[in-house]
Structure formats: C-alpha cells, structure tokens
Amino acid sequence: MGYKIAVVGATGAVGREVLTTLAEREFPVDELVPLASERSAGQEISFGEDEVLKVRDLSGFDFKGTDIVLSSPGAKVSAEFSPIAARAGAVVIDNTSHFRMDPDIPLVVPEVNPDALAGYGRRNIVANPNCSTIQMVVALKPLHDIAPIARIVVATYQSVSGGGKDKMDELFNQTRGVYVNEPVRPEHFTKQIAFNVIPHIDVFMEDGTTKEEWKMAAETKKILDPAIKVAATCVRVPVFIGHAEAIHIEFDSPIDEDEAREALRAAPGVILIDHRHDEGYVTPIECVGEDAVFVSRLRTDPSVEHGLSMWVVSDNLRKGAALNAVQIAEKLVEEYLG
C-alpha cells in the first residue's frame, strides 16, 4: 500500500533532505506533492533518481486525501497550515518549534520514545524535536536505561545549516570576503560567523538563557524524563553541516565506562567510534550524509560521584531533522495507519 505524501517547505534545506530521505529509504509513496510559498511555486525539484516534480503553492493547496504531511516551513507558517492539514485528515509530522511543548502533541524520537506516537490522534500532529536535542537523547537513552540520569551539562557546537540557507550563504560570503579584504557585515547573525563562534542561538530569555538552550532542557524532559536537570550552552560555529556536543552526565547510581560502551554499541541509531589516539573520534565533517548519531571521547567524569563525559556528533539536516521525521512516518505506517 502506498500513501499520498505532502512535503511542506520542499525547497528549503530540510525539505530537500526530506525528499532525498524518502527516496533513499523507499518509503511507500503513491503520490508526492512538494509545497512551498507562492514565490517558489512552479520550480522543479527532484525526487529520487528519475522523478522531477513541480512545486505547488502551499496557500492554495487542498490537503483532503493526503495521508501524511512532512512539514518544515518555519514556525509561523506551520502554526497556520499544520492544523489545516490535520483537520483535513492528514497526519502532520511537524519539524518546527511551534507544537513541540503542546501537551496534546507527541514529541518523538523513534529510538527513544516510540510509544508516545500512540497519542498522535488527539490533534493529528506529531512534533519533531530540535536537532540538538535529537542527537543528545539518542545517545543518552541507552545510558539512562542502565542508571537514571540526574543532570546533564552540555555545550553545543552547531553548524550554520541549523539556521537555514541564508545563514549558510552568510558563512560562505563572509569567509570569501575575509580573503579579499572586504568588510564583514553581519546580516543574519548578530556577529561575524566566519572564523568565529557565537554563543547565541535563537532569542534571549529573561533568565539569561537563549531559547535554543531552553528547548534542549524542556524537550529532553518531555522525551526522556521530566526529572532530568539540563544546563546547556548553545554555540553557533563556522561549519556548514553537522552539530557536535560535549556532554557531561551525572547519574543517580554507579555506571562504569565498560558498561556504557556496551550499551552504546547495542543502541539503535548510535555508532560508537572511540579510540584514544589521533583520529580516534568523529568530527562534524565526517558525519555529513550519515544517518547515525556518533559517540566518541567516552570517559569518566571525576568531578561528580557517578559521572561520564562524551562527544556526540550528527548530521543536523538528516537525523536532526529529515531522517527523524521520515522515521516517525515509517513508525506511523507500521503501527497505526496500516
């Protein structure tokens, strides 16, 4: 059985990755409709090796008869159109921040909390978590199953693609400009991103955290365990694709390195590459195009009674967005939509 699938935001970086992922994983598609804003309508976009589709205008599209919507258009657009699609009978997998903390909407990482999908019918919407949260909870789940996690301190090193195509273009243009002595004029970032790092992603909140840092804490609690305390510092770095995280974990009970290694080796979606010598770890550039969450630098944290530290890397456009959404769709088809 095949399904009618609509991809909202099809011309964006995540939307294109969704199309690629659907084709690569041979999702059972009978009909695929790429949707975007009016200015993108009529553009041609590839699906798989041979099929070329014309992008249609989201604002005029009738979702009746659509089975699944994979939506990545930005929070404001999603807030308007995801409920429209859901009321028309489609199940919407929404990759924006708008619905994530709604108590009636499941926030799902299939390797971590697939049972949460059972609640999809309350609103016909499933939320895809933030990219930095996804890779962290995939790496934490097998450890949390052994010894409950009490506290996480995490510093992220997030690529510019997490902010969209405009920010990728800004990094490229600023880098080129530095080499030809052009003045650097930040447009989409608050400060120069080329040859720099910026400890500021999303807006600042009253307590001094940024919205990105709040998301990591709130989403981890919703997905993994509400008792976990999270302190995050989220940093944008001059890398095009691939997020990295330095994670320090405090557990409620003892856990040793060997036990953690075995759990991570057996965990779905995780690849442990951890050798204590040169090149014995994974960096962002090496994870591009890969589906897995890579764990390296696993070691004891001697600053707490029961602690481990690790380095976690993943392609933010794939597992951090498109792949996770498609995996949710696969799970829906397998267990609920039939």
Image (spheres, rainbow, N blue to C red):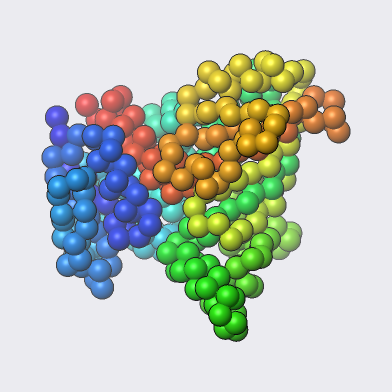
Is residue 134 toward the left or the right of residue 306 in the image? left
Look at the image and tell me in which quarter the N terminus lies: top left
Residue 123 in picture, x, y percent from top left: 35, 43
Residue 127 in picture, x, y percent from top left: 42, 44
Between residues 124 and 235, which one lies in front from this camera angle? 235
Label total for image: 0
Residue 335 in picture, x, y percent from top left: 30, 24
Q: Residue at x 24, y 35 (%)?
A: 27
* Looking at the image, residue 197 lies above or below residue 281: below
Q: Is residue 322 visible?
A: yes
* Looking at the image, residue 273 lies above or below residue 203: above
Is residue 54 toward the left or the right of residue 68 in the image? left
Q: Residue at x 63, y 37 (%)?
A: 279
Q: Would you identify the image quadrant in which residue 43 lies?
A: bottom left
Q: Residue at x 24, y 62 (%)?
A: 58
Look at the image and tell me in which quarter the C terminus lies: top left
Is residue 130 toward the left or the right of residue 23 in the image? right
Residue 210 in picture, x, y percent from top left: 65, 59
Between residues 331 and 26, which one lies in front from this camera angle? 26
